[in-house]
Image (cartoon, rainbow, N blue to C red):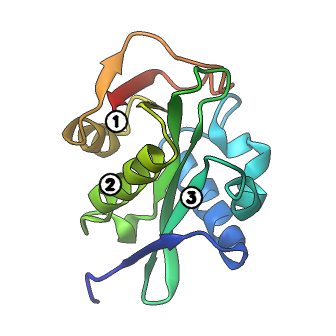
């Protein structure tokens, strides 16, 4: 199988695949109970949710199939210059291709383009590869959450200057 992939903006035709990825990956890491993004209303309509101002969501496509995604949006309950890296989930076949670092760059570039000055994210213990990517991408740990995402199931928080 080829290691080539495409990162592109989400389209309505991707909504079902992205929702399925979120619902498959989160339980893999024990993130399927209350207080996790799996239960956010936008999961079933990601293209519409991220068509709003200062929001963007991108998908990773390989051989015609959507195998991952990530986006940025204003941090709910946060300062105007802070965005959140949201719903970055990759199926196992998307991992190890370099797509995570490429997706991170695409999201951070979009955030800068929207005028954000800082990028925040939430994750949880056990998502070690993701946390390594965040650190390589310039994120540093926080001792407590920011904003009001409602994701009380997350226990690791990161931020970086843009």
Residue 81 x %, y %: 52, 28
Q: Secondary structure at mark 3?
A: strand
In this view, the residue in front, 133 or 49, is 49
Residue 44: quarter of image: bottom right
Which label belongs to residue 112? none
11 left or right of 83 in image: right
Marker disc for residue 57: 3
Select label 2 or label 1 by which is in front.
1
Q: Which residue is the site of mark 2? A: 105
- State if disc 1 and disc 2 touch (CB < 8 Å): no
As helix, strand or loop, the secondary structure at mark 2 comes to helix
Say if 78 sits above or below 143 in the image.
below
Whole-number angstrom distance, CA of label 2 to CA of label 1 = 11 Å
Among the 4 quarters of the image, the one containing residue 127: top left
Image quarter (top left, top right, bottom left or bottom right) of the C terminus: top left
Q: Residue furthest top?
A: 143
Residue drawn where x is 63% and y is 27% of the image: 151
Dot 2, how many residues are within 10 Å of its Cα: few (below 14), some (14-19), or many (20+)?
Answer: few
- Quick one: 21 or 138, which is closer to the camera? 138
Lower sequence index among marks 3 and 2? 3
- 116 vs 94: above or below: above
| Residue 110, percent from left and from top | 46, 53
The residue carrying mark 1 is 162
Q: Earlier in the sequence, mark 2 or mark 1?
A: 2
Circles 1 and 3, Cβ within 8 Å, touching? The answer is no
Nearer the observer: mark 1 or 3; the answer is 1
Which residue: 67% across, 55% down?
Answer: 50
- Per the model, the C-alpha gap separating discs 3 and 2 is 13 Å
Cα gap from disc 1 to disc 3, whole angstroms: 18 Å
């Amino acid at each position: 199988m080829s290691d080539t992939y495409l990162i592109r903006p989400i389209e309505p035709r991707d909504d079902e695949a992205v929702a399925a990825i979120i619902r498959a990956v989160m339980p893999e890491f024990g993130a399927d109970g209350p207080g996790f993004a799996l239960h956010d209303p936008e999961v079933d309509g990601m293209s519409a949710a991220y068509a709003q101002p200062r929001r963007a969501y991108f998908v990773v496509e390989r051989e015609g199939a959507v195998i991952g995604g990530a986006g940025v949006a204003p941090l709910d309950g946060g300062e105007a210059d802070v965005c959140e890296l949201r719903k970055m989930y990759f199926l196992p076949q998307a991992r190890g291709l370099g797509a995570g670092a490429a997706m991170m760059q695409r999201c951070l570039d979009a955030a800068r383009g929207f005028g954000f000055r800082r990028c925040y994210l939430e994750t949880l213990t056990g998502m070690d590869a993701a946390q390594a990517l965040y650190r390589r991408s310039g994120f540093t740990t926080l001792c407590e959450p920011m904003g009001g995402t409602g994701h009380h199931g997350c226990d690791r928080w990161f931020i970086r200057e843009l």
